[in-house]
Structures are given as C-alpha cells and as structure tokens.
Image (cartoon, rainbow, N blue to C red):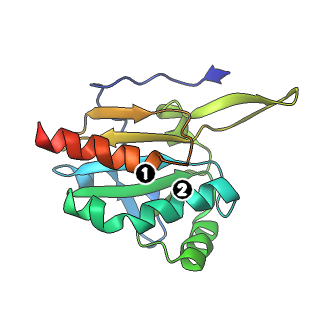
Amino acid sequence: MVRTRVLRVGDLAPAFALPSTSGEVIRLEQLRGRRVVVYFYPKDDTPGCTKEACGFHAESAAFARLGVVVVGVSGDSVESHQRFAKKFGLAFPLLSDDGFRVCKAYGVYTKKSLYGRTSWGIERTTVVIDEDGRITAIFPKVRVDGHIQALLNALTASVAE
C-alpha cells in the first residue's frame, strides 16, 4: 500500500476549506479553539460507511459534551452527501473532497490491493485535532465496530489529563 503523505501526532493539521452539506464552505481555521474529529471514509451510503456515520450521529451528544466538532470527509459530491445525510438524519457536516486534495494532505488517499486488483481510494481514518490545530491522535485503518467508543474513551481521557 502506498501513502500520499504521513502525518504524526504533534504535527500541525493541514488546512482545508471544503464545501459541506450545509451549503457552506467549512475551513479548519474556523474551528480553532475547539477540538475537531475529522473522519475520512470511502463512500456515502455503503454498509461500513453508513454504520460509521450513524455511530457518530448516535453519539453526537457525547461529542458535544466533550466540546468536540465532528466532520466527515469523502470524495463524494455535496449532493451525494446531502442525500446520505438526509436518509440517515445525520446532524454533523459532511465535506466533499472532490479531487482528494485534502485526503492526500492527510495521507489517507492510498493505493489499495484487493483480490489482486489495485486502485486508489480513501483508507478509513480518524484524526483528532486540538484547539490549536495540532494533531493529537490518529486512528488509521479504522474498523467500524467499536471505533466510536474507543474514540470517545480517548477523548474523555485527554480531557481528564
């Protein structure tokens, strides 16, 4: 598997400005002063991505209590994101990275191999960014089952420190 970039905990998170389901462009710099969870996922309305999105939605109150903003990013269009969000009642923004510029900057756009066929795509990854714009945690190659709870546990532990 080939990565486009490797980020590490402590790095300044790459800036982004992407169109969202709300119709607005969301910029990382607008979220300074708050912790941000950016979860990268391959495709709207597919089984794993739906389960992950619905998991974030189900725990939205827990994220809010921790003062955490959640955004999802994929290469799907804003229109696809809007249909997906409406279908499942998602209350957090989904951002369209058409062209995968931000996915490449975060190192989640990778060359994958499945059954002997290779293709480029998004590796399911979650990145936690602190109030100052620094990466505090990276969850690569996310397995959906148990991920949201593990993420909440990590966020809660970091608040307690």
Report crowding for label 1: few under 14, some 14 to 19, many 20 or more residues within 10 A (C-alpha): some
Q: Position of residue 48 (x, y in %)?
A: 64, 53
Total number of numbered discs in the rendering: 2
Q: Which residue is labeled 1 in the image?
A: 148
Q: Nearer the viewer, residue 74 or 50?
A: 50
Q: Secondary structure at mark 1?
A: helix
Q: Give the spatial CA distance, label 2 vs label 1.
A: 8 Å
Q: Secondary structure at mark 2?
A: helix
Q: Quadrant of residue 7?
A: top left
Report crowding for label 2: few under 14, some 14 to 19, many 20 or more residues within 10 A (C-alpha): many
Compared with residue 129, is residue 67 higher up or lower down, i.e. above or below?
below
Q: Is residue 81 visible?
A: yes
Q: Which residue is labeled 2 in the image?
A: 52
Which residue occupies 51% across, 52% down?
Answer: 73
Compared with residue 55, is residue 108 higher up or lower down, i.e. above or below?
above
Q: Is residue 93 visible?
A: no
Which residue occupies 62% across, 75% down?
Answer: 83
Q: What amino acid is labelled 1 in the image? A: Ile
Which residue occupies 61% across, 62% down?
Answer: 50
> Position of 3 compared to 115: left or right?
left
Q: Position of residue 11 (x, y in %)?
A: 30, 25
Q: Quadrant of the N terminus?
A: top right
Q: Nearer the viewer, residue 103 or 101?
A: 103
Q: What amino acid is labelled 2 in the image? A: Glu
> Position of 62 compared to 144: left or right?
left
Q: Position of residue 53 (x, y in %)?
A: 52, 61
